[in-house]
Image (spheres, rainbow, N blue to C red):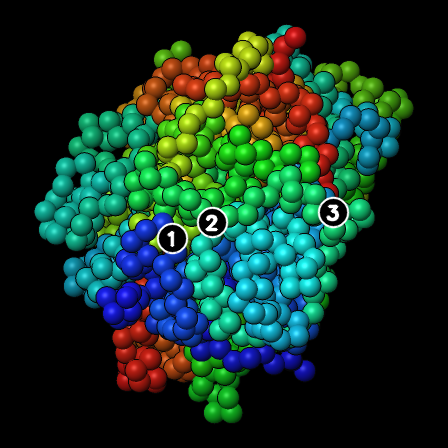
């Protein structure tokens, strides 16, 4: 049906796929059809298989071998090129779908949720097969990977059975008929292939989603992936749709810039989403309810005074005396959800260590933030962050010198 | 179809070893950034001299106090740390003339051709301070320079400045110019270098220090800038008062 | 024996302003380009962040961002009958080193030359007669006109986001701008910077004396800006740490802030830092470059073959590399033959410091940018009648004070002792109420037969090669020019309300220990006659047609302006010729 209606599916046009939020039409039996592969390539980009399954710059695409940091240790990604021996070339379609949507390998052993199958399970069978069709066309690489590099006892895959029982519900995304098609598409992308929940939803100590706090932020790899609900202070409440789209497409918007792991995600994945999918994601995220936190504790006057002195002397030359920064260059701290996040890890990290924001084709400047860790002690970092979080319209809990000290210790040995 | 992504981690330069196993690296794909890059300054710590002997240190403190005498509002060269500044500088790359062209032959030339001595500042101070003290001991009943009265010191220094008094084995006038320069530099440099203790020199002149943002003051003409000076290492107001 | 690297289409020596411009242009043409930079990679968030860049001792006094003489220096003498001695520590100029070159630590003063500057000999001869010019003055026409370069000045100014007020828009003189400037096709991309107190006062005094002051064109931006490459810059915050220093907040135009973020993303561009080019290699005929040889920090030599060589290493290193590579005939001042090393020039700088009543004037000198200031151009170039005056040339003048950094800005009135209690109170009393323009008078430096570059007979560099020797002194023409301009400048400072002036005329002999800008020019000049120039009007070597040499080494003489705007415009002009003509048909673009 689709083929007749649209003889050439141009990569990124996606018109046919907007007919619904990816719900099952009959799977196209021709895995080699051009439009299927093109759709699969797009979905592979959305699901960002490349990022985890490729070693940074030196590796062959999808050949695995990348060490991935998890709270339980380092795990190594597997080879998903179509090599028969060391990749997935010999897998059947069903085996591929089982791995992606159920977290089970052909030999029955369980995948760790570093592979975000709890999110990918929401993908339609058809979409997963499209990805499979695309992956079948990439260059096969003969590279054996020992994936399970977790330390004992986490290296016991059998432990995933009770984990799955607790935290994993298999099942395709069910659209909400009371919502628009755009909302449903956005929900599908965020919860499914985009697997935003993998980083942005808080986890239990065993690494399962706290589904009641969906997308309210999570601390991982030395960063706090922020709240991306519509909360005004902590989330995207102050963001317009254009802000969200601009951020995902270019890494920058008038208020903030992406850095750290999100930078990679934007370059490899979201910067290539088509416009209607970005619109759908914005629609969905802006609908998520705000938090019901009680008002944050008041910051003390001596701390605010010290923070203001540091801010004027050290921060205002880029971020402005009014905290508004310079659009697309220096984030607006006054509006920054990263700066106001309940877990200030990312803010502390950036102040101590500096960083460079992402460069994309649309926004190549990639301005950097200097490191202040050598210059400001824990009390001073806490004071200036507390000031930034409370000086302008919104308020957030003070940052303690202890939290800064802990972060400083943890960052000492990081290489990124 | 293979995706070729050379700008994989946005913002991270890709350092690729060239095909010949070289030590010359190539940068491409993205602007370099690594954590802990750059070289923030390391503040001088108070303590014993790093370069001076105790006699030399006393002499330089005495020189500093005549070049910048103390007054009721602002400390002099010694108390503001100028001798400490010079000591630490002479113990470091400045003293050794690191980075200078030090190949022979050393020939004296015109003033316009600049210093042509094999001696850098450290060697110069060592020779000159010894010569100065020897001269004073010979001329002032065995007293070293630091032990002369202030009037005697000033008189001697003026005489050296005017080339009326010469010192043995050293160009005394040039040496004195060097000391004046170094003392005054130490007085006005950032306190992290050992001089300008507590930013006393900056307070004296009304210089607000290591600031970076005057956008709200550009058009406030002929008004006193009210904020206190700040050093690269900060100011008291940066710490919450308990 | 050098190790040979894979061939590239283009090798660029030096990744400063013109190296970056050429790289961006030639990669846009689809060529595979590598740049080789002697110094290190540097950038704002890491090497000059706004929390330790503002360190006067480190960057201005110890000049940490600059080349070390130990790595490479020159010898110097005033006259041919003297022995040149090494410049053991920099003084009258300070060569850059590192990615971005001088573009990292310049003041961002972005001037255009006057139309007459490009046809100087023709114009002055027409107006004053050949006999008016000193016999040993070797000024020449550039071989290009202002009109040739206008679109390229425009390109550079829009690349940088230059802040200014146009004075001549397509022939119409505009109020508030420089009425003497050549016609520009469109206004500056951003408005002029706001001026602090003393600079505003200078403008007022100048106006009252009948001059037409204008804001200095500034590459420190007055507002946030996105350039045509899509690269973003922020507004200058007047920190007062501009020249000598890297900019910490992306508000000074430099290769890092205007070109490199885009350039580095191109798959056909790469660069090597910490790699020093030793010579340009030629084939057996001596007429074709085959690439360059460079050495890494381990001392290993490498050969980078390429079809096209762009030499963008800064005036002095350009000339030195040509001499070491035996490209072009070295200049012999006695025989007056040869081209490499001739027409070497600097800048004729002086200033007048003014001391004011500290109860009435508070200038807050620390609030400034590198290209701040109100200037007048009445005494630049041939904008005034030189007939009765007995000299040619001139310069702009202005209160262009770029900061109040205390080590260098604690001047005292003339006659004050240099140390002691009186010195101390004079410093205290005068810091906030004095005007120290710095390069207040920024005059031209014309070229002479006995001011030139060649190789030293005695002193060697760390590779055992002869150092390059500078033979340079002021001639009467420039001294007279400077005395005249300085007196005019002093009148304006006095009219501002100064009670005491400290006039610091430029005097001969040329002193290699006193800083006089790093505007060194010439030595590999452009022109229309291969007997008296090294390059044709497209900056292409007359001798080696696949070699182009960018930079102020191409200037046959210096004008009364900062050179960078013209250096960049010439680079864009050359790039256009390479893209539009040379690549289609490699070979000499001009047949002399």
Q: Residue A2 at x, y = what percent?
A: 29, 65
Rendered residue at 70%/27% (across/down): A405
Sort mark 3 into few (<14), some (14-19) or many (20+) by Cα contacts within 10 Å.
few
Q: Residue at x 23, y 36 (%)?
A: C213
Q: Residue furthest front?
A: A26
Secondary element type, mark 1 = loop
Helix, strand or loop at label 2? It is: loop
- CA–CA distance in space, label 2 to label 1: 9 Å
Which mark is drawn over residue A159? 3
Name the side, left or right, on which C105 lies relative to C72: left
Q: Position of residue C233 (x, y in %)?
A: 38, 43
Give the label on residue A23, or none: 1
In this rendering, the answer to whether A244 lies above or below A347 is: below
Q: Are marks 1 and 3 on the same chain?
A: yes
Q: Are the residues tagged 2 and 1 within 8 Å (C-beta)? A: yes
User: Can residue B213 be seen from the camera position used here?
Assistant: no
A376 lies above or below C362: below
Q: Quadrant of residue C261?
A: bottom left
Q: Which residue is mark 2?
A: A172
Of residue A28 and residue B189, the one placed in the foreground of this image is A28
Q: Quadrant of the C terminus of chain C?
A: bottom left
Marks 3 and 2 sit apart, C-alpha to C-alpha, by: 24 Å
Residue at the spot 61% in from the left edge and 81% down from the top edge:
C4
Query: How many numbered callouts?
Result: 3
At a point 54% along the width and 64% down the height, the residue shown is A94
Task: Pick whichever of labels 2 and 1 is earlier in the sequence.
Answer: 1
């Amino acid at each position: 049906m689709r083929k007749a209606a649209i003889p050439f599916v141009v990569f990124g046009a996606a018109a046919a796929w907007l007919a619904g939020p990816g719900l099952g039409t009959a799977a196209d039996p021709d895995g080699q059809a051009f439009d299927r592969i093109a759709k699969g390539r797009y979905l592979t980009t959305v699901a960002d298989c490349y990022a985890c399954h490729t070693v940074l710059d030196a590796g062959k695409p999808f050949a695995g071998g990348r060490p991935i940091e998890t709270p339980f240790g380092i795990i190594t990604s597997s080879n998903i090129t179509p090599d028969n021996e060391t990749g997935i070339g010999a897998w059947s379609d069903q085996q591929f779908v089982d791995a992606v949507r159920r977290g089970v390998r052909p030999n029955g052993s369980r995948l760790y949720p570093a592979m975000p199958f709890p999110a990918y399970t929401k993908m339609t069978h058809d979409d997963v097969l499209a990805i499979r069709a695309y992956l079948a066309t990439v260059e096969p690489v003969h590279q054996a990977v020992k994936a399970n590099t977790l330390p004992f006892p986490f290296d016991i895959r059998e432990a995933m059975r009770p984990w799955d029982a607790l935290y994993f519900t298999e099942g395709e995304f069910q659209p909400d008929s009371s919502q628009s098609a755009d909302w449903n598409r956005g929900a599908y992308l965020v919860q499914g292939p985009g697997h935003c929940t993998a980083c942005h939803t808080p986890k239990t100590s065993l690494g399962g989603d706290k589904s009641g706090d969906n997308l309210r932020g999570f601390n991982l790899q030395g960063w706090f992936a922020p709240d991306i609900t519509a909360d005004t202070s902590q989330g995207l409440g102050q963001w317009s749709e254009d802000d969200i789209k601009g951020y995902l497409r270019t890494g920058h918007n008038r208020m903030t810039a992406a850095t750290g792991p999100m930078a990679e995600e934007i370059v490899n994945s979201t910067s290539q989403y088509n416009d209607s999918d970005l619109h759908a994601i914005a629609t969905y995220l802006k609908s998520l309810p705000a938090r019901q936190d009680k008002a944050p504790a008041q910051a003390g006057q001596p701390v605010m005074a010290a923070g203001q002195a540091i801010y004027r002397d050290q921060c205002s030359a880029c971020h402005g005396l009014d905290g508004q920064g310079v659009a697309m260059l220096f984030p607006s701290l006054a509006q920054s959800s990263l700066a106001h996040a309940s877990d200030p890890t990312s803010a502390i990290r950036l102040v101590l260590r500096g960083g460079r924001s992402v460069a994309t084709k649309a926004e190549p400047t990639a301005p950097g933030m200097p490191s202040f860790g050598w210059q400001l002690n824990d009390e001073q970092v806490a004071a200036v962050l507390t000031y930034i979080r409370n000086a302008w319209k919104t308020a957030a809990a003070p940052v303690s010198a202890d939290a800064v000290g802990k972060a400083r210790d943890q960052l000492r040995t990081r290489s990124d | 179809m293979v995706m070729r992504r050379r700008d994989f981690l946005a913002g991270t330069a890709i350092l690729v070893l060239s095909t010949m196993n070289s030590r010359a690296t190539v940068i491409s794909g993205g602007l370099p950034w690594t954590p802990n890059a750059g070289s923030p300054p390391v503040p001088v710590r108070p303590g014993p001299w790093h370069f001076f002997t105790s006699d030399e240190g006393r002499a330089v403190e005495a020189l500093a106090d005549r070049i910048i005498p103390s007054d009721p509002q602002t400390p002099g060269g010694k108390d503001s740390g100028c001798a400490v500044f010079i000591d630490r500088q002479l113990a470091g790359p400045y003293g050794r003339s690191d980075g200078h062209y030090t190949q022979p032959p050393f020939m004296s030339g015109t003033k316009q051709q600049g210093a042509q001595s094999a001696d850098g500042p450290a060697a110069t101070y060592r020779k000159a301070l010894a010569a100065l003290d020897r001269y004073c001991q010979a001329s002032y009943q065995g007293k070293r320079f630091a032990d002369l009265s202030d009037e005697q010191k000033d008189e001697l220094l003026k005489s050296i400045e005017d080339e009326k008094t010469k010192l043995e084995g050293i160009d005394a006038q040039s040496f004195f110019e060097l000391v004046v320069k170094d003392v005054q530099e130490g007085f006005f440099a950032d306190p992290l270098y050992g001089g300008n203790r507590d930013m006393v020199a900056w307070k004296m002149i009304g210089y607000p220090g290591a600031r970076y943002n005057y956008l709200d003051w550009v058009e406030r003409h002929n008004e006193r800038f009210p904020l206190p000076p700040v050093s690269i290492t900060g100011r008291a107001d940066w710490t919450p008062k308990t | 024996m050098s190790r040979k690297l894979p061939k590239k289409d283009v090798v660029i020596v030096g990744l400063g302003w013109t190296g970056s411009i050429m790289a961006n242009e030639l990669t846009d043409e689809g060529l595979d380009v590598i740049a080789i930079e002697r110094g290190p990679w540097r950038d704002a968030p890491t090497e000059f962040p706004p929390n330790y860049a503002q360190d006067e001792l480190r960057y201005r006094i110890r000049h940490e961002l600059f080349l070390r003489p130990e790595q490479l220096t020159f010898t110097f003498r005033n006259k041919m009958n003297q022995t040149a001695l090494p410049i053991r520590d920099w003084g009258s100029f300070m060569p850059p080193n590192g990615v971005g070159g001088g573009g990292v630590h310049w003041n961002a003063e972005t001037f255009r030359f006057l139309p007459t500057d490009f046809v100087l000999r023709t114009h002055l001869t027409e107006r004053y007669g050949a006999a008016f010019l000193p016999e040993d003055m070797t000024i020449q026409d550039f071989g290009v006109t202002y009109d040739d370069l206008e679109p390229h000045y425009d390109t550079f100014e829009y690349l940088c986001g230059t802040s200014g007020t146009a004075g001549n828009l397509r022939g119409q003189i505009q109020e508030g701008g420089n009425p003497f400037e050549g016609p520009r096709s469109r206004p500056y991309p951003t408005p002029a910077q706001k001026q602090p107190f003393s600079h505003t006062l200078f403008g007022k005094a100048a106006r009252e004396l009948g001059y037409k002051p204008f804001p200095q064109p500034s590459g420190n931006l007055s507002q946030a800006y996105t350039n045509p490459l899509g690269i973003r810059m922020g507004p200058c915050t007047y920190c007062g740490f501009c020249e000598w220093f890297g900019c910490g907040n992306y508000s000074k135009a430099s290769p890092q802030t205007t070109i490199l973020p885009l350039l580095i993303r191109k798959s056909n561009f790469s660069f090597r830092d910490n790699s020093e080019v030793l010579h340009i290699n030629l084939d057996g005929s001596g007429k074709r470059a085959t690439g360059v040889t460079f050495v890494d920090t381990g001392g290993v030599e490498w050969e980078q073959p390429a079809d096209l060589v762009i030499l963008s290493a800064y005036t002095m290193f350009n000339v030195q590399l040509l001499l070491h590579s035996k490209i072009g005939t070295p200049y012999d001042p006695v025989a007056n033959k040869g081209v490499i090393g001739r027409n070497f020039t600097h800048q004729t700088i002086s200033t007048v410091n003014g001391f004011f009543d500290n109860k009435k004037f508070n200038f807050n000198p620390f609030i400034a940018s590198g290209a701040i200031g109100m200037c007048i151009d009445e005494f630049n170039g041939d904008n005034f009648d030189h007939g009765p005056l007995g000299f040619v040339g001139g310069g702009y003048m202005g209160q262009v004070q770029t900061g109040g950094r205390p080590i260098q800005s604690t001047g005292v009135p003339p006659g004050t002792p240099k140390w002691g209690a009186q010195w101390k109170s004079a410093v205290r009393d005068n810091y906030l109420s004095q005007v120290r323009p710095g390069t207040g008078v920024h005059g031209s430096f014309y070229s002479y037969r006995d001011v030139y570059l060649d190789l030293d007979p005695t002193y060697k560099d760390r590779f055992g090669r002869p150092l390059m020797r500078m033979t340079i002194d002021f001639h009467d023409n420039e001294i007279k020019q400077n005395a005249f301009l300085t007196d005019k400048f002093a009148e304006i400072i006095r009219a501002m309300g100064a009670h005491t002036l400290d006039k610091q005329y430029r005097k001969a002999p040329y002193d290699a220990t006193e800083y006089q800008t790093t505007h060194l020019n010439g030595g590999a000049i452009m022109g229309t006659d291969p007997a008296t120039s090294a390059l044709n009007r497209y900056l292409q070597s007359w001798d080696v047609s696949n070699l182009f040499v960018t930079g102020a080494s191409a200037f046959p003489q210096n004008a009364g302006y900062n050179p960078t705007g013209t250096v960049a415009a010439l680079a864009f002009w050359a790039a256009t010729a390479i893209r539009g003509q040379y690549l289609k048909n490699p070979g000499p673009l001009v047949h002399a």
